Amino acid sequence: MAFLWVALGGACGAVMRFGVSKLLAGSTLSFPLATLVVNVFGSFLIGFLATGFFINDKPVPEARLFFQTGLLGAFTTFSAFSLETMQLWQSGQVKTAAVNVVANVVLSLLAVALGLVVGASLGARLR
């Protein structure tokens, strides 16, 4: 049954990722903005969900499998980030590639931290 929860979450996450790509496809930036947005937002969400806020601090393995492993695993795109960074590098856009690396790593770590804080704060208020 665990595989089913991961598969269902993964399908939802992949569709969400595709939607963000389509939504931001018209961007005139020569920067992989959709991947950055997905990685930062996904990092916030995983930090928020890791607090257990949405399940009243009671571990619900199915919810974690669906949201954290499935949905967010498919939604965030480290492999796409890596490929886009290499393509920027190989096309001579070394500074843009470096900005992409720093932006994705730093903003995603900050987003996880923010998600943890927001989730813990909301969880404390609801108790």
Image (cartoon, rainbow, N blue to C red):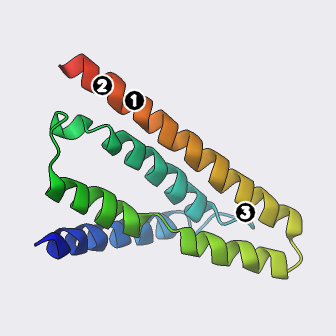
Which residue carries the number 2 mark?
Answer: 122
Dot 2 or dot 3, earlier in sequence? 3
Q: Which sits in the foreground, 122 or 64?
A: 64
Quarter holding the N terminus is bottom left
Type of amino acid under label 2? Leu
Disc 1, disc 3: CB below 8 Å? no
Residue at the location (57% across, 40% down)?
A: 110
Vertical placement of 115 versus 107: above or below?
Answer: above
Nearer to us of marks 2 and 3 is 2
**Above or below for 2 versus 118:** below
Return the x and y of residue 26 as percentages of the image width and height: 60, 67
Horizontal side of residue 83 vs 40, given as left or right: right
The location of residue 21, given as percent across then percent down, is 50, 69
Q: Earlier in the sequence, mark 1 or mark 3?
A: 3
Do the residues bearing badges 2 and 1 touch, measured as CB atoms within 8 Å? yes
Q: Residues within 10 Å of mark 3 (few under 14, many from 20)?
A: few
Q: What's the CA distance linking mark 2 and mark 3?
A: 36 Å
What's the distance in space between the residues labelled 1 and 3, CA to CA? 31 Å
Asked which secondary structure carries label 2, the reply is helix
**Picture residue at 72% right of the left edge, 64% below the top:** 31
Q: CA distance from mark 2 to mark 1?
A: 6 Å
Residue at the farthest left position: 1
Q: Amino acid at mark 3?
A: Leu
Relative to 37, does residue 6 appear above or below in the rendering?
Answer: below
Q: Which residue is mark 3?
A: 29
In the image, 53 versus 12, the foreground residue is 53
Observer-side mark, 1 or 3, equals 1
Residue at the spot x=72%, y=60% of the render?
100
Count residues near mark 2 (Cα–Cα under 10 Å), then give few for <14, some for 14-19, many for 20+: some
Q: Which mark is residue 118?
A: 1
